[in-house]
Image (cartoon, rainbow, N blue to C red):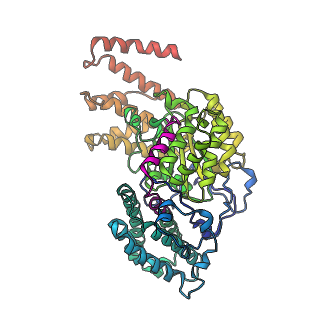
Amino acid sequence: MPPPTSSKRKRPLPSLLQPGSWRNKRSRSNSPSGSAPDSSASSQGMARPHTAGQSATHSRISSPDAGFEPLAAYAHIPVDATSASQGIARDSLITTSGSALNQHTNETPWTGLEKALAALHITTKICPPLHSAIDGLRSCLHIFEAVKPRKDYDELATGLTAMVKLLIKHMSVAPSRDIVETITDIAGNIRKEVESIDKRQSRSGPHRMLGVSGDEEDLVRRYRRIEQLFRQLQAEASMSAWSETKKNRVDSQLEKLGPVKLASYNSMLSMDIGRRSCTKNTRTQVLNNCMVWAGDPRGAKIYWMNGMAGTGKTTIAYSFSEELEAAGQLAASFFCTRTSRECSEAKQIVPTLAYQLARRSAPFRDALCGVLNKDPDVGSLNAVLQFGSLLAKPLVEARESMARNLVVVVDALDECSDPHAVTIVLDILFRFAADLPVKFFVTSRPEPSIRNSMMSGISERDRPDSILYLHEVEESLVQADIERYLKDELDHMLPAHATEIEQLAEQAGKLFIYAATAIRYIQPAGKFADPKQRLKTILGVTRKSKKSLSDLDALYSAILSASMHDDALEPEEQDGMRTLPSVVSMQI
């Protein structure tokens, strides 16, 4: 079942295309936006979507209706070079409805969009990748225009026209070199969306393509994605005149938050501890459904993926973060781990998320710096006040200008050293999440304190739609992924040892950690070993019970026993291996 949706009324398409204001700051995001994934996949064990009749009162985490304002009519606003570089005040832009854009002409919304794109095409010669992307978008406008009976498409065109006209004004000031680099990344992703639309058209022709509801929905989704990318272009272009002095001052403010930079999903620490993404073509159903939840504007604001030790939570969270990053939807990430003192402190989560969000979103950074200007010591406040000042307030203030469908990923909360601090963080999330323009993806083991917070925050009726128990995903699906992972890691032993590898996959059951531990033993990094003999040793471990952790204990015992007689070890290392079982027993 797919991840959850809230029970709120679905907003009409025009409400998703509101161009907001852009502050006088430059965005230097390290997050390249990518094509939205195919959202048609489903998964057993995933959450089911809400139906339209479900009441929003049954969950504290359902997504509220956003009070969006009508489309702005940007075309009539005079903008000189100074105002373009300094940003345009929001109140001066939101003056009329989107229909006012064409009220003095007889042109259709699509004619207006074509003219606006033609003008932008000329303006963007300074940036060839964007110039090419605009050319590609112009070439596929007829596909959208072919669906004239649908009013939503005309409103989509009107909204995008408004943003294109504003972007032209911003681009009238020559952007700096580093801004051009960021714009180039965004332009590449506009091109990807256009190419995807063009491929569908070439397979079936525009009229046939738009006659299928699934294709129409995909088309609208990609159009919205293009609209979101134009939002980012506006932000980047409007920040091009941000002075170096101001940049240094803002950098100093953000650094004073004391963020844990190693907590990012892809930090240097991730390499040191072996954190990685899923093997290609594994956990695809889980990941596809996570992306569907992330891209659904009606989706629940908090989603909890939990599972027993070894079920692959962190690896899935890593892959999910990668996909969000590629789609331009990753707001921030905090991967907890006991291997780092800083990354195991729950009190560091809020300042770190605020820091990362500020680095990725210029509108949020502007709002956050406004808070820090008024209270430079807000980072020393208690957790509730910190969350309100560093995340909630800036997010609400910047919501109209931020990209849509952003997701914050917090992995392995059970690895935090202070369970009480974790409880406080979760309680704060449930208190604020419904009113924020971002979603939260949280993973952990089902530890009692975490489970209690989740159960009190999510109503009983909504739990099946807001929680994924990873260890309850059908075993056959998990084993197929484990077998694929093992064959990928041991491909040099195929096809001669295919049967043994399949036996190892069956022996692993639903525990990815079993398979990963076996791989580290069979082919240790930086050491010579006989992989065939080591595979034989592991296959000699008999399953003693139906309890998966008992099987894992047996695997560890076999590895320790074999290691004691490893000639590659120094004598003192062998002595250490012999004392290890006693130490482990004392800990138990």
Residue at position x 41%, y 78% in the image: 118
Q: Residue 168 appears at what percent x and percent y?
A: 45, 71
Q: Give the camera-side residue of 343 and 355.
A: 355
Left or right of residue 190, residue 428 in this image: right
Confirm whether residue 307 shows in the render.
Answer: no
Q: In this view of the protein, can residue 298 be seen by the observer?
A: yes
Front residue (pair 82, 463): 82
- Across the whole image, how many numbered discs are drawn on residues? 0
Residue that sits furthest to the bottom in the current view: 106
Q: Which residues are magenta?
A: 231-259
Residue 285 in percent (x, y) is at 49, 52
Residue at image location 68% in from the left, 35% down from the top: 452
The verdict on residue 255 being magenta is yes
Name the dominant secondary structure of the magenta segment: helix
Residue sitting nearer the eye, 274 or 569: 274
Is 160 displayed left or right of 94 in the figure?
A: left
Looking at the rendering, in which quadrant would you find the N terminus? bottom right
299 versus 270 height, above or below: below
Q: Is residue 63 magenta?
A: no
Residue 165 % position (x, y): 49, 73
Q: Is residue 421 left or right of residue 243?
A: right
On the image, which quarter does residue 241 sit in? Answer: bottom left
Against 580, residue 325 (above or below) is: below
The residue sitting at 32% across, 31% down in the picture is 522
Instruction: Find residue 119 and report its horizontal and vertical position in percent.
Output: 42, 77
